[in-house]
Amino acid sequence: MGTIERLAVDLLRVCQQNDSAELKILLHQLVETVSTPGDITCLIGPVMKLLPSHNTNVKKTAYSVLPRLYECIRDSDPGVVTSSLLTLDTILASEGGVVVSRNMAAYLLRRLQDFPDPQLATVLEVIGKYKPQEEEELFQELSILDPYLVRSSGAAVVVNCIKLFLKLTEERHPQLKSEIIHRVVPVLKQFLSSGSPRDSTDYVLDFLLFMNQDSDWLIPFSDSPHLFYPKNYDTDLALALKKLRLLPYICTESNFKEILHNLEQEYCRIPKTCTDAMTCVCLISGRVPLAGSKCLNVLITLMDSSDCHVCENVLRTLQDFNLAGFKDDEIRSIIRKILMKIDLSVKDVPYVLPILLGEFGELIEDQSPYVLESLAHNFELYDDCMQSLTLTAALKMFLKMPAKCQHSLGEIMEKCIHDMMRNDSEKMLGLQQRALKYYHLLKADVHLVKKMLTTQN
């Protein structure tokens, strides 16, 4: 064990004893011995242990190390500088991290060229803690940072520089945003291309996921959807799934057919990517109205897969698929397809069935009352969620087709109110109370029930 490590261990031991006199001596020795990046990081553990102390002298001793760390920021070794910044940021995390003054920001900006890429990315992040007060100072900083916006050797540097540019300009010069995007998108595409280092691709994907609600940033990638196809899902699933999560945000009226074709033919049929790929289809339907019918057709086609895992995922995805605005024939097709694929006699009926029956059961009036009758008959077999959905579906169908659904609604309410009285679980009691509320409301005012269900939707 080296001197630094030994002093750190001794300091941590004395921390438990709250001996402020010995702490002060040991901490002074530790600080004086610090000279390398590795030494600096050894300060984190002891100081973090000291700071929460209720002993005023102990806390004062801990804070005495901070000036030495701030001094290290001016060290000639870039490694010492970045280690000092990271250590300060960790120690002062509860207070907002390292404090960056105007002089420190100016000093770090002058030294940017001294730092290799990983350390430069850290320095750019730290500089972002300082906000220039004057226009001249702001544009001087932007001028120094400008070359690093398109630095192709490291994605972390480019991304952190983008974030810094946006932070510096968003308040007083928001018009610069479009210019920044125009300049950096080609570089970001390079980092997403095959052959780019994995860390670089990951850094860019994380940035785009963070910006996914800002279409200004994602739409410029719409001409290159291939960059987001998860081709390496076997070797790097985490990266592949990030790409899939971004596909809906680069999908447009001009590229949705290509994207949906790739999803249907490959990624929706692969166990590792199936769930996320179908979620992607669902999101595309909501974000690109013109693609809605195509998205629905993709899911209908996938239900013919011989892989039961694929079919199960389609049924789960359809729970979140918004069918509002679709043609009646399209909705009929998906409901009839579901009824062909499921077994109504088992307890694991998919949740999507009562959801669709409640919303659109009248579109298959020749079948839906009989399906509801089957759900009512097997009601006790279902889990809490399925029972709740079935009760709601029965009520909605009754309001649309009272003569055909009255018996099934009555049977379900009977089971909720009376048969379940022997089960005192909280969820069962909640379902019982809902059924009683619906019963009394139906007796009092049917129109009020319709209004209530509309509000819940």
Image: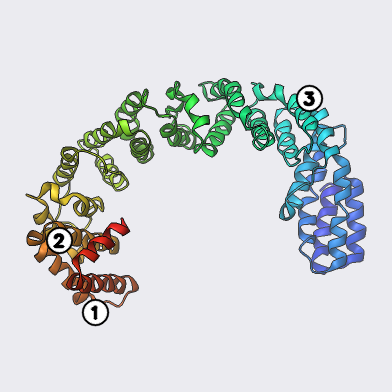
**Three-letter code for the amino acid on which mark 2 is drawn:** Phe
Q: Is 277 placed above or below 225 here?
A: below
**Local crowd at mark 1 within 10 Å, few (<14), some, or many (≥20)?**
few
Q: Is 394 placed above or below 290 here?
A: below
Residue 173 shows up from this direction: yes
Question: Tag 3, which secondary structure?
Answer: helix
The residue mark sitting in front, 2 or 3, is 2
**Three-letter code for the amino acid on which mark 1 is drawn:** Arg
Q: What is the spatial separation of the Cα atoms under label 2 and label 3, in whole angstroms?
A: 73 Å
**Three-letter code for the amino acid on which mark 3 is drawn:** Gln
Q: Is 264 placed above or below 345 here?
A: above
| Front residue (pair 159, 172) | 172
Q: Is 230 placed above or below 356 here?
A: above
Q: What is the spatial separation of the Cα atoms under label 2 and label 1, in whole angstroms?
A: 27 Å
The label shown at residue 354 is none
Q: Are marks 2 and 3 in contact (CB under 8 Å)?
A: no
Question: Tag 1, which secondary structure?
Answer: helix
> Does residue 179 appear to the left or right of 308 in the view shown?
right
- How many badges with numbers are in the image? 3
Question: Residue 448, how many percent across, how many down?
Answer: 24, 65
**Local crowd at mark 3 within 10 Å, few (<14), some, or many (≥20)?**
few
Residue labelled with disc 3: 113
> Does residue 175 appear to the left or right of 59 in the view shown?
left
Q: Earlier in the sequence, mark 2 or mark 3?
A: 3
| Front residue (pair 150, 322) | 322
Q: Earlier in the sequence, mark 2 or mark 1?
A: 2
Residue at the (26%, 63%) spot, across then down = 388
**Local crowd at mark 2 within 10 Å, few (<14), some, or many (≥20)?**
many
Question: Residue 457, how many percent across, how many down?
Answer: 31, 55
The label shown at residue 398 is 2
Residue labelled with disc 1: 422
Q: What is the spatial separation of the Cα atoms under label 1 and label 3, in whole angstroms?
A: 75 Å
